[in-house]
Amino acid sequence: ELTAEAYYKHLQNQIDYKDGAEINTVSDVESVLLYGIGRAYGLELASKYSKLDYSIYAAYTYCRSLLTVAGINDNLAYFSRYDRPNEVNILAEHKLNAKDKLIVSFSYASGNPITIPSSRYMALVNGEQVIIEEFEKINNFRLPSTHHLDISYVHTKSYARFRSTLILGIYNIYNQHNPFMVYLGVNKNDEPSLKSRSYLPVMPMFKYTLSL
């Protein structure tokens, strides 16, 4: 079984911040907002195969998201923060018996574009040293791709009035450090350096549900 779908969307009244806007220091957030247009397009492919006690599902998505806002990026189109060109999801299932099954899933996604400073320096402002950051272009850096492999065991049991489901598993089995943010910091020599923060390392999964 194979399905394919393509799409194109034209978007109005898209909002973004002015270049260099510091939303944490302004009292009127609307004063740093600009409005423009956007477009999103892509292709979605999905496939499913089953044989005996085995089944596998795979999906791929190609997606682009761009904005054009007067006053940002020299009025030229740029990739929005939601632009993730490639996404892949694969799920394999093996039924051990009528009550038990094993599931292995893998997910991959391109990183989102973010804006990071192109330079940073110290300056005197009102007699105090402050850090000044300069930005050349919006969304000038793309986060690294994220991916993880999960495995789980599912046991279901039916009773007279309800059904129970027990799920035991391991998330991110090879402990991939997927970054959710990147920022400009300093290394041990006080030199500018890109640093990242990650989320959800390898961890156990447990879920127990009852349904009528």
Image (tube, rainbow, N blue to C red):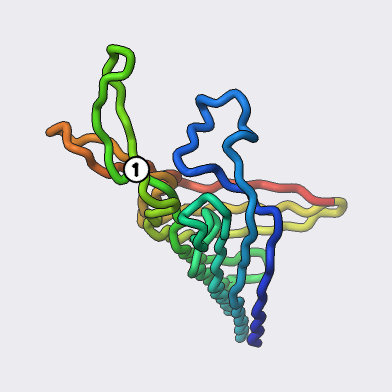
Residue 40 lies left or right of residue 75; in this view the side is right
- The answer to whether 102 is drawn above or below residue 139 in the figure is below
Q: Quadrant of residue 133?
A: top left
Residue 125 lies left or right of residue 46; in this view the side is left
Residue at 30% over, 42% down: 195
Q: Name the residue under label 1.
A: 117
Q: Quadrant of residue 96?
A: bottom right
Q: Quadrant of residue 102?
A: bottom right
Residue 46 lies left or right of residue 24; in this view the side is right
Report x, y in % for residue 43: 59, 77
User: Which one is in front, 76 or 66?
Assistant: 76
Residue 209 lies left or right of residue 28; in this view the side is right
- The answer to whether 52 is drawn above or below residue 187 in the figure is below
Residue 144 seen in render: yes
- The answer to whether 86 is drawn above or below residue 186 in the figure is below
- Badge 1, how many Cα within 10 Å: few under 14, some, many 20+? some
Residue 148 seen in render: no
Report x, y in % for residue 45: 60, 80
Report x, y in % for residue 150: 48, 59
User: Which one is in front, 95 or 30?
Assistant: 30
Residue at 17% over, 36% down: 191
Report x, y in % for residue 142: 40, 56
Q: In the displayed image of the protein, which residue is found farthest to the right? A: 161
- At mark 1, the secondary structure is loop
Q: In the displayed image of the protein, which residue is found farthest to the left? A: 189
Identity, as a three-letter code, of the amino acid under mark 1 = Pro
Residue at 56% over, 72% down: 61
